[in-house]
Image: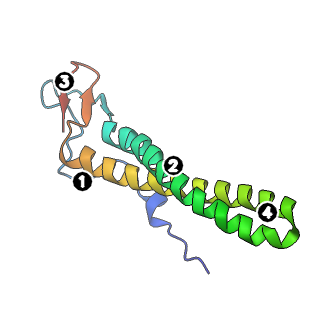
Amino acid sequence: MYVELEEEDARPSSTSGPSKPLSCPACNSRNIETLNYGRRIGGAIGTTAGAAGGFLSALSGARAGAVAGAAAGPVGSVVGGAIGAVLAGLAGGAAGAVTGVAVGTLVDDSILDNRHCLHCDHTFS
Ligand SMILES: [Zn+2]
């Protein structure tokens, strides 16, 4: 059973909190974009790291699949190994991407100048 989380979508984006300025501190322009470098980079790194980790678990996944498939003979062993490897690899990549985005979001919020003024090219956090 899933409990629906309507809060995330229902909340308007303008209520991001008083700590985050919505206008440029240099020229007061409201033409601001959010860069989210950390989130993007984190997602990419996380996917790569996750896929690398997924590769290792893919090896054991292949082994487990091969053992399970062996009951159906040599062909079952090969097919089972391939399915086990793909499933383990996909799971690793997806988990890595989620982790990377979460870490990158933290970096965006705490370290980087995450906002960019489209009017005067000023970056600020
Ligand atoms: Zn500006």
Secondary structure of the residue carrying tag 4 is helix
Numbered badge on residue 122: 3
Which residue type does callout 3 highlight?
His
Q: Residue furthest bottom?
A: 1
Residue position for label 4: 77
Question: Which tag is nearer the camera, tag 1 or tag 3?
Answer: 3
Sequence-wise, the earlier of marks 1 and 4 is 1
In three-dimensional space, the C-alpha distance between marks 1 and 4, rounded to whole angstroms, equals 56 Å
Which residue type does callout 1 highlight?
Gly
* In the displayed structure image, the side of residue 37 where residue 52 appears, left or right: right
Numbered badge on residue 17: 1
In three-dimensional space, the C-alpha distance between marks 1 and 3, rounded to whole angstroms, equals 21 Å
Q: Residue furthest front?
A: 74
- Quadrant where ligand 1 appears: top left
Which residue type does callout 2 highlight?
Ala
The answer to whether 97 is drawn above or below residue 26 in the figure is below
> Within 8 Å of ligand 1, the CB of disc 1?
no
Question: Which tag is nearer the camera, tag 2 or tag 3?
Answer: 2
